[in-house]
Image (tube, coloured by chain):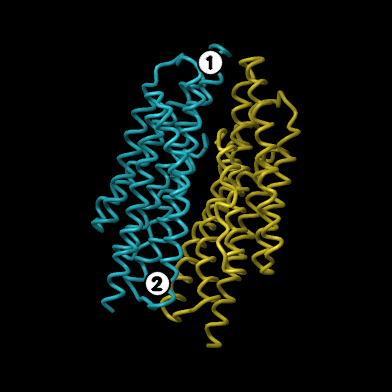
Chain colours: A yellow, B cyan
Amino acid sequence: MRHFVEELEQLKTKLLEMAALVESSIQRSISAVTQKDRGAAEEVFRNETSINAIEIDIDDFAINLLALHQPMAADLRLIVAALKINTDLERMGDLAVNIALRALALMEGPMIKPMIDIPHIAGLVQSMVRKSLDAFVRRDADLARSVLASDDAVDSLRTACYHELVSFMEQDTANIQQSLALLSITRNLERIADHSTNIAEDVLFLVKGIDVRHHAELHKQKDAGHG
Amino acid sequence: MRHFVEELEQLKTKLLEMAALVESSIQRSISAVTQKDRGAAEEVFRNETSINAIEIDIDDFAINLLALHQPMAADLRLIVAALKINTDLERMGDLAVNIALRALALMEGPMIKPMIDIPHIAGLVQSMVRKSLDAFVRRDADLARSVLASDDAVDSLRTACYHELVSFMEQDTANIQQSLALLSITRNLERIADHSTNIAEDVLFLVKGIDVRHHAELHKQKDAGHG
């Protein structure tokens, strides 16, 4: 069994390496937007290839652990949570690619509207990602719950941003292309937040053995309108 | 072992019940858009609650099978694939909710542009969903591969639709709100197609034991720009 304990640790280490790469991609994609940093965008594209390879490696490793060790209870929950978190992390990497692509489009012209909201939403989303991963490492249910609570704040910010950008488009058709790019960036940031919520839910399943998914149906339905 | 074989069949049956509900939600959400059918939209909202409950039930059932039967090889792959397909189906239900919400917004006024593209994209996406689920039931690798091939067609259609709607917005600011709703609907349809691609990849993993994810990195990167 000592071997198995080591392999579980290895699974966690692999997942945290994956998480570090995804967090770096998110950070770079935001820098690409806010600093017009073309090199940062290119690093996001490069990272995606590594993230995809690591996703497959982690899945294989986790499935082999299931096949070889017939884990029970908490160990089984850890492996299932790792499989789910792995998928969420890979999708977050894809969303960072979407943001970086939009950043490249925005670099082509001057900004006609100051980006006050984007760094604000981005900061909140990055903090959710960080907390959901810290909650996984420390098996901290309270921290995981705090991530679920932040999701509403991101939704509200994005709804406000949506309305502002739509009226900006309505003022002048020349604003449309840039506003659509900014809308896309906020939408992708919100989807990253949704994935960190998924991770927080997996942490609660892992730590407490309880399923907290769909904890706030009404909220989701209310806010889905700008999806 | 006979017991286990029956339980695996039960897992598949549960997943297909879930799939039927999700397919119905997608169909209803499209009717809500194209027929201005408010009742269809309301059924999508009702379905979501059932879909969420079934998702949790299937996850629990699959994890219990892993815990109790220490499955190997093909059985293990089936259970892992079921866990993944379950997640994809639930997200597809959420996306149908997004579409139904947009449909309600569109019902408030007359259509200023005929919806030629939406039924076209919707038909293609529904056929991908159907094929990915048929491929799962029949363990048909060729059918699963045909789903992967269709993904590019959906991406191209959506890109064309995107450019058309943007120029429509640029012609007259009065078109902006409706165009944004239509853009959102096509984006959500494309995300449903992405999930059916995930299911097709899981079927290939199940049938062949091979991992075909990230088979077309360049395509994804190219098309992610309107995400």
Residue A151 against residue B56 in the figure, above or below: above
The residues bearing labels 2 and 1 have C-alpha atoms spaced at a distance of: 53 Å
Tell me which residue sits at (37%, 71%) in the image.
Answer: B76
Label 1 is found on which chain of the structure?
B
| Labels 2 and 1 positioned on one and the same chain | yes
* Residue in front for this viewpoint, A154 or A188: A154
Q: Amino acid at mark 2?
A: Leu
Residue A48 against residue A121 in the figure, above or below: below
Q: Quadrant of the C terminus of chain A?
A: top right
Q: Of the numbered discs in the image, which one, if any, rests on residue B65?
A: 2
Q: Position of residue A125 (x, y in %)?
A: 68, 47
Q: What residue does disc 1 label? A: B175
Q: Secondary structure at mark 1?
A: helix
Q: Is residue A66 left or right of residue B19?
A: right
> Of label 2 and label 1, which has the lower sequence position?
2
Tell me which residue sits at (56%, 19%) in the image.
Answer: B176
* Residue in front for this viewpoint, A34 or B87: B87
Q: Position of residue B70 (x, y in %)?
A: 39, 78
Q: Position of residue A162 (x, y in %)?
A: 64, 30
Label 2 is found on which chain of the structure?
B
Q: Amino acid at mark 1?
A: Asn
Tell me which residue sits at (43%, 27%) in the image.
Answer: B38
Mark 1 neighbour class, 10 Å CA radius: few under 14, some 14 to 19, many 20 or more: some
